Structure formats: structure tokens, C-alpha cells
Amino acid sequence: MAEQREMKAKTPWHSGKVICVAVFFIAALITLVAIAFVQNKPIPQKYKYGIVLDAGSSHTAVYIYEWPAEKENNTGMVRQRHTCAVKGKGISSYAQKSSGAGQSLMECIEDAKGNIPADKHEETPVYLGATAGMRLLRMQDSESAEEVMTSVKATLMSSPFDYQGARIISGQEEGAFGWITVNYLGKNFRKAAGTMGALDLGGASTQITFVSGQSVESPDNSMDFRLYGNDYQLYTHSFLCYGKDQVLKLALEKRLMPVETSLEDPCFHPGYSEKKSVKNVFDTPCVHTINKEDMDKSFTHNGTGNFTECQSSIMKVFNFSQCTNSRCSFNGVYQPPIEGTFGAFSAFYFVMNFLNLTGHSLADSKRGLEVYCNTPWDAIKERHPTVKHKYLAEYCFSGTYILTLLENGYNFTFENWKHISFIDKIEDSNAGWTLGYMLNLTNMIPAEAPDTPLMPHGGFVTLVLFLTIFLLILLLLWYKFLGLPSCSSPKEVV
């Protein structure tokens, strides 16, 4: 027909085939976007929690740790979440009223309840480790020590947490777990450079721990650990009665015998004078030469402030004459040669930091202490008005003792003194034995099955590729059914 126009035939957009292709295209596109979103959605991290109470000689501290439920290399990735200082003295001070030991922990237990999610309370293990203060009390009065431990056990068992034990840990354990802490925090277990030794100083004991290249001659000073797939044989020893508080009593004992009415002490500042009871100063199993009849006496403690004489006085508490092994530190205790770097924490850090000597050489530290010890007591009090006089008066002694212990006791030299780092915290976690203790214990806690992505990475890539190809096919079908759009006007054919 003449009026018939010749046009390129096209499929209407609303035909069944076009609608079907559009539906499949939209569905495939939505599926692809949804899978990509779910696959890459951040996985909520599951955490476990643990509580360790450090019942030391002078105070108790409560540490809360957390770690991912999925462990890495058989060692839980533990970090310190919170800490609470128990008010009052250490639990060993409750020997005459044992019930007070458990009661003293209640405030920090309540604090822990608020820092751990409520739904995790029942599965959160709680441990208490008592150190040198309780070791001394057990030596002095085993019955009282048992009553104190019974009191703290009852308190922990009544808490909502999973009570796992309260015990007096050995000095070797304290040293070894401190070594684990400094190396874990320093990430040394993942480095080829080796581990760091640990130096710990408390009120009643001191510990030295390091990996020695030599075979350990004394089995009592050896401990084995397996961490991050590696085996470590440690040399470790704990010297009971050689913490800074107890060794002060030993040094005073040497100077006061026989018991007199006054004592001139070069380890205290010039002008320092304090009347003290013999019983209050020397009522400890570390002191053996004070007679019972002298315990009711008192003496006046006067300071003369002389670093050199103070060091000579402290040297008398060490015994360097006995050694049945190839080499010893002091008191006949075997010690292999010092190797590598060391982290010195607890009272090592607190005392040296107060004296501003943490970054000094051994020679400079001695010169600094010489000036400090010779400073008049009135000037020291004026310089530090907020520090309790009891603690302030002892810094000259404590600093001199630390230098003497490290140099003459542990055999550090002017050359390798620079290998000692005085540390308090590493990455917001306190240096000390409790973190190492927690790390060791988490190896015995089964790991939960981790939350995983929707599908494995390979499966995800395959599905995305399939959906992409499917979308391309749908686009081709769309083109086939509708054709390419044309911008030119149709021509009439007469």
C-alpha cells in the first residue's frame, strides 16, 4: 500500500520478554550488592575475660584482662583492660584478723563487676596469687597464713566470677611469669632478635630471669615454657628477704647489733631523726639476731647521708664467699653470665623514676645518688611535700640498694648497664608477673569457634564473577529485544 511506511521493527518495551529480562537484571544486581555488603561487614569480635589478683607484701592489686576468643599460635592475645588498687596493706598484714583479708578485696571485686559485661561474669575466671609477703608469713606462722588464704578464697568464691584458685605462688613462678610479661608486651616472641631478661623487685623479694645460652647447672633455677610454637628454657631465681623493705631491716640489723638506744645511718638524709620500736622494725622471719628480750626496746634512727658508706653498709647483707657452682650471684646461688637486654620493673622502676635515674649510666647514677643522699632532710621534705615521710625517707637507701644489687649482686657492669630498661607499662599494660600468669592460664582455656564471613574468599570471588557474567548476558538480551536506540527520524517510502 502507498500509505504503508517501511520502519525497522522493534519489540515494544512492555513485551513479556523485556519485562522478564528486567526482573532478572534487577534481582541479580540486588543479590550482588547484598552479598558484597554481608561478606565485607565487620565481624563482631568475641572476647573472653580473666581476673588476676596480685597479693603482694605491701598491697594487693586487681588486674582485669581481655583477649579474643580465637587464640593465635596457642597463646591468647591478652591485654590489660582495667586495674584496681585494694585499699590498705597486703593480705599478710591481716595475720591477727584473717577475716579482714577477704573483706579488703570486696570493693575491687565490685569494681570488676562493672568493668566486665554481665553476661560474661559466670565464665570469667578469677585467680589470686600471693607472693613474698605470704611466703614470709607461712614461714613465720603457717596456721595464720592458711587462715588468711581461706578468707580470700571465701570472698572470691562468693563473687559472680568463675573462681579458679587462690594460692601462694613460688618465687620461681613469680620471676618466670614476669619474664613472659615483658617479652609478650615487647612482642619479642615474634622477633628473631631474641628475648629480654626480667628484673623484678618487690617489698619482700627480688627476681632475676633470662634465657641463658649455657646449660643451667642448678635444676631448681630452671623452668621450661612453650610459647608461640617455641620452647624456652629459663634461668630464674627469687631471693626471699631481698625485697627493698626486708633488706632495709637486714641492713639496720647489721648496724644496730648489739641493740643500742641510737643508730647512725648513712642511708638516711642528714637531719633525719625518728624514734622507732625494735619490734615494729624487726618483727620478721628475715631477721635472726635480735633477741626476744630486746623486742620491747626502742631506738632513735638518725641519718648521716653518705652514699659511699651506705653502699658499704648494704654490701654486708650479701654473702659472696660461698659458691659451690662454677659461678654465683650471691648467697651461694648459681647464676650464669648475664646475657642480652633486661627489663627492670616494679620497685626497680618506681624508685629509679622518683630519683630521675632511669636513663642514666651506672657512673652517673652513683653521682646522682651521692648528691641526693647528702641533701638535708628538711630540704627533701620541702621538695616533695605530698610524699609520705616514711616512703620519702627511704629513697636514698632504696636507690643505693638497687645499684648495689644490680652491680654487685647480679653482676651488671658499667658496660652492660645500658642494656637495662627501667619500665612501668608497655602498651597500657603494667609490667609484672600477673599478665604472664594470665597468658599461661589462657592456654588451658578452650578457644571458641570464631565468627566467619558468609562464605570463603574463593567462593565469594566465584559468585561475584558468576553474577557479573549473568548481568552482562541480561544486558545483551536487553539489546537484542529492544535494539539500539536511534537518533534519526524514520524515512517514508512511497
Image (cartoon, rainbow, N blue to C red):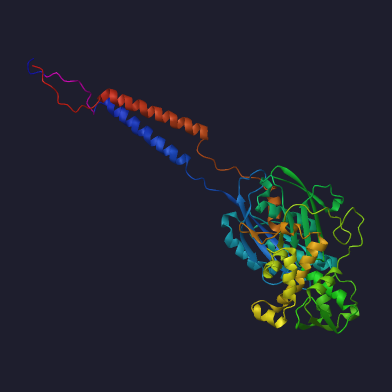
Viewer-side residue, 54 vs 359: 359
Q: Is residue 98 visible?
A: no
Q: Is residue 461 left or right of residue 224?
A: left
Q: Which residue of the protein is positioned furthest toward the top in this rendering?
A: 1
Viewer-side residue, 39 vs 254: 254
**Does residue 287 belong to the magenta stretch?**
no
Q: Quadrant of residue 245?
A: bottom right
Q: Is residue 19 left or right of residue 468?
A: left
* Residue 181 vertical position relative to residue 381 in the rendered view, above or below: above
* Residue 441 vertical position relative to residue 380 in the rendered view, above or below: above
Viewer-side residue, 280 vs 442: 280
* Residue 19 vertical position relative to residue 228 in the rendered view, above or below: above
* Residue 302 vertical position relative to residue 131 in the rendered view, above or below: below
Q: Quadrant of residue 343?
A: bottom right
Q: Is residue 220 visible?
A: yes
- Position of residue 56 measured from the top left corner of the image (x, y, whole percent): 74, 65
Name the quadrant of the N terminus.
top left
Q: Quadrant of residue 427?
A: bottom right
- Give the residue at x 44% y 41%: 37
Q: Is residue 119 left or right of residue 53?
A: left
- Position of residue 364 measured from the top left corner of the image (x, y, whole percent): 72, 67
Which SS does the magenta portion mostly show? Answer: loop
Q: Which residues are magenta?
A: 5-13
- Position of residue 255 measured from the top left corner of the image (x, y, whole percent): 86, 76
- Position of residue 290 measured from the top left corner of the image (x, y, whole percent): 89, 76
- Give the residue at x 43% y 28%: 466
- Give the residue at x 82% y 65%: 138
Viewer-side residue, 404 vs 30: 404
- Give the residue at x 40% y 38%: 33
